Amino acid sequence: MNRSQLIIQEVSRCPAVDGATMADILAFSEPLRLTLKHVVRNGPLPVDQFAEHLDVDLDAAHIIVQRLLENGYLEKVYADETGKNAAPMYRVALAPLRGRPIPDDL
Amino acid sequence: MSKIVSVHSFRGGTGKSNTTANLAALLAARGLRVGVVDTDIMSPGIHVLFGVDESEMVHSLNDYLWGECNVEDAAIDVTARLNGSIPGKIFLIPSSMKTGDIARVLREGYDVGLLNDGYQRLIQKLSLDALLIDTHPGLNEETLLSIAISDVLAIVMRPDSQDYQGTAVTVEVARKLDVPLLLLIVNKTPQVFDSQMVKQRVEKTFGCEVAAVLPHSDEMMTLASEGIFVLRYPDHPMTGMLKQVATRALP
């Protein structure tokens, strides 16, 4: 299996989440982990830059991004607020930190 | 380009907040604009070092995370209140000390994505040269986030077996997240220890650079977080060591 296929397989098998935790990102293999870390640090990327960071072709990058989007790790954003004129970009959808039962009178 | 520096330790009581505050003062003394975020929401405290009383916190990081203000609204310019002439600026973004606010965070949680966005917004809105993140000890979602986004991760540890074990975990995580610069600071080192030997042992153990071996200091203990050590003792050898750390983190 080549690099693209391995990464596609990995994102196809990763569990669906309601937002990614950093622990989820740590669990990925190196190319995915470092790419997602880059996105967390530097902000959303278009698909072609995902391809560059992952060192895969554009078609593979489209599949990878789509799977991560479907599984809840990424969210789509637009540089242009209206979303009409700009190409979409993708940022890591960080999961909210959940609370725990604490007495209301504390 | 702005740099994000996280100051972390696996265990509490290593001197993280003091290290963060002192590094901030040293960077500001070089004329830099420095932000300091107290992300230790469960046990905040760095505001004490900057002489900020709870009553002065119009907004806190907590308010931002609950969507009640912009993150820069929680920033307090603490430069003028420090004992020393500082050509730069220090902006403190404190966490709330109110029991109810801490309980609310525990009860409701918060949006980690918002915390991440907040860091970038602070850099932009306050024109920061450096953003220092004072973290909660140990590994949790907030500390993993701060490690991931850091240009520099300074791990503070004591020359203690428990700290050695815990630091190993943090170093491994930092390597997996490809932190560009990883520095170890060995703090509260007994005076009977040979600092060169401590440095060599720690560097060999973790394969990382030790930026400083800071001795246990009676002056620091006596100061008791009621001020910034490097400003109170500008000629102290430990101030010189902390200057080296600051220069290493931001050349």
Image (cartoon, rainbow, N blue to C red):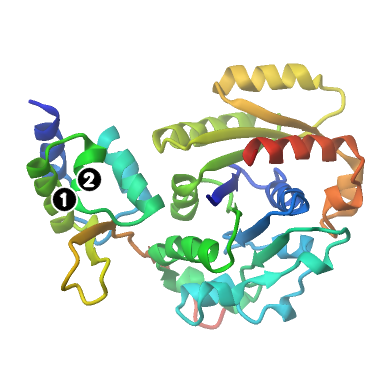
User: Relative to B176, is A71 above or below?
Assistant: below
Question: Residue at the spot x=11%, y=49% of the render?
Answer: A62
Residue pointed to by mark 2: A50
Identify the secondary structure beneath mark 1: helix
Q: Which mark is residue A65?
A: 1
Asked which secondary structure carries label 2, the reply is: helix
* Nearer the observer, A44 or B67: A44
Which residue occupies 11% across, 45% down? A12
Chain for mark 1?
Answer: A
Screen quadrant of the C terminus of chain B? top right
The amino acid sitting under disc 2 is: Phe
Q: Is residue A80 above or below residue B234?
A: below
Q: Nearer the viewer, residue B92 or B38?
A: B92
Residue B201 location in percent, x, y? 66, 18
Q: Are marks 2 and 1 in contact (CB under 8 Å)?
A: yes
Question: Which circle marks residue B67 in the picture?
Answer: none
Q: Residue furthest front?
A: A85
From the viewer's perspective, is B170 left or right of B212? left
Q: Nearer the viewer, residue B203 or B84?
A: B84
Residue B185 position by quadrant: top right
Distance CA(mark 2)–CA(mark 1): 8 Å
Q: Read off the chain for label 2.
A: A
**Coordinates of residue B231 in the picture (x, y in percent):** 86, 52
Identity, as a three-letter code, of the amino acid under mark 1: Val
Q: Say left or right for B27 vs B7.
A: right
User: Camera-side residue: A90 or B174?
Assistant: A90
Residue B232 in percent (x, y) is at 90, 52
Crowding around mark 1 (Cα neighbors within 10 Å: few <14, some 14 to 19, many 20+) is many
Q: What residue lies at 82% left-to-right and 22% top-to-bottom?
A: B193
Residue at point 22%, 45% (across, down):
A50
Q: Check disc 2: other Cα within 10 Å, few if <14, some if 14-19, many if 20+.
A: many
